[in-house]
Image: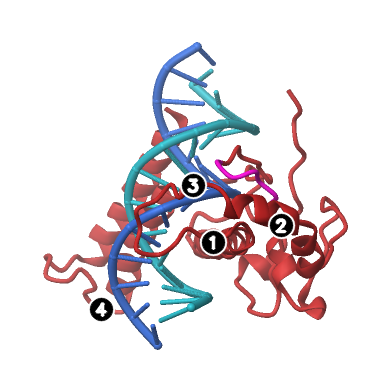
Chain colours: A red, B blue, C cyan
DNA sequence: TAGGCCATCTGGTCCT
DNA sequence: AGGACCAGATGGCCTA
């Protein structure tokens, strides 16, 4: 089995800079993956949807080509796909091959942004630095506890109807949550 | 090897 | 009409 090397993290991407979207994925574990698709797959990098001056290159990436060029090479496949039977009973007609590729790229970019947002959230958690990686679920749980601590620090109750916690209580809740999530990670 | 996690694809629905 | 968002399915990677 081939072991992929991590893609270098692009911090601009991870913080969600609107002017730069890279295909570099923020998590060291999350290398580019390919998946068998029901369509004959020809993935388009999200960067291929950007203006040329917005594109950044990762050392791991293949040279980029324009989406137009990419799509034009698929024209013959498009014609073939048009002849495929409709697999869906949706009101909307099934997307053509090229439009499916573009939609896939948009969805990929959207999920990358989501991942970047999780990474940005992880970075502001109190335990940032000691932990290499937390699951998204752990990030959310710890973040919730952290918000309560910050609220208690400012003498504000963010718990929405729950009992207001003292700073001491929220701090213990946060510690407990962190320990629990780390334990969950190990077990 | 099983299970957790996550990237990706896909089709459905909502919204502008 | 088409983009955004969402959830389900699938499969790769990693760890215990």
Q: Residue at x 42, y 27 (%)?
A: A187
Q: Secondary structure at mark 4?
A: loop
Residue A92 % position (x, y):
40, 64
Between disc 3 and disc 4, the foreground one is 3
Q: Residue at x 49, y 64 (%)?
A: A121
Q: Quadrant of the N terminus of chain A?
A: top right
Q: Which mark is residue A107?
A: 1
Say which label, 1 or 4, has the lower sequence index.
1
- Whether A99 is drawn above or below C9: the answer is below
**Residue wearing tag 3:** A85
Between disc 2 and disc 1, the foreground one is 1
Q: Which mark is residue A24?
A: 2
Say which label, 2 or 3, has the lower sequence index.
2
Image mark 3: chain: A
Q: Secondary structure at mark 2?
A: loop
Q: Nearer the viewer, residue A4 or A170?
A: A4
């Amino acid at each position: 089995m081939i072991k992929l090397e991590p893609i270098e993290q692009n911090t601009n991407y991870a913080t969600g800079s609107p002017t730069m979207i890279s295909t570099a994925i923020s998590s060291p574990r999350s290398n580019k993956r390919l998946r068998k698709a029901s369509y004959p797959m020809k993935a388009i990098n999200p960067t291929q949807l950007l203006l040329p001056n917005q594109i950044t290159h990762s050392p791991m990436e293949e040279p980029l080509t324009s989406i137009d060029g990419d799509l034009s090479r698929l024209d013959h496949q498009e014609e073939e796909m048009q002849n495929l039977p409709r697999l869906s009973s949706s009101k909307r007609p099934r997307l053509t091959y090229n439009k499916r590729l573009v939609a896939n790229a948009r969805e990929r970019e959207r999920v990358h942004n989501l991942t970047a947002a999780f990474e940005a959230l992880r970075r502001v958690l109190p335990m940032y630095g000691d932990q290499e990686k937390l699951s998204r679920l752990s990030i959310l749980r710890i973040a919730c506890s952290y918000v309560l601590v910050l609220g208690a620090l400012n003498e504000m109750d963010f718990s929405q109807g729950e009992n207001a916690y003292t700073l001491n209580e929220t701090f213990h809740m946060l510690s407990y949550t962190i320990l629990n999530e780390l334990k969950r990670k190990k077990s």
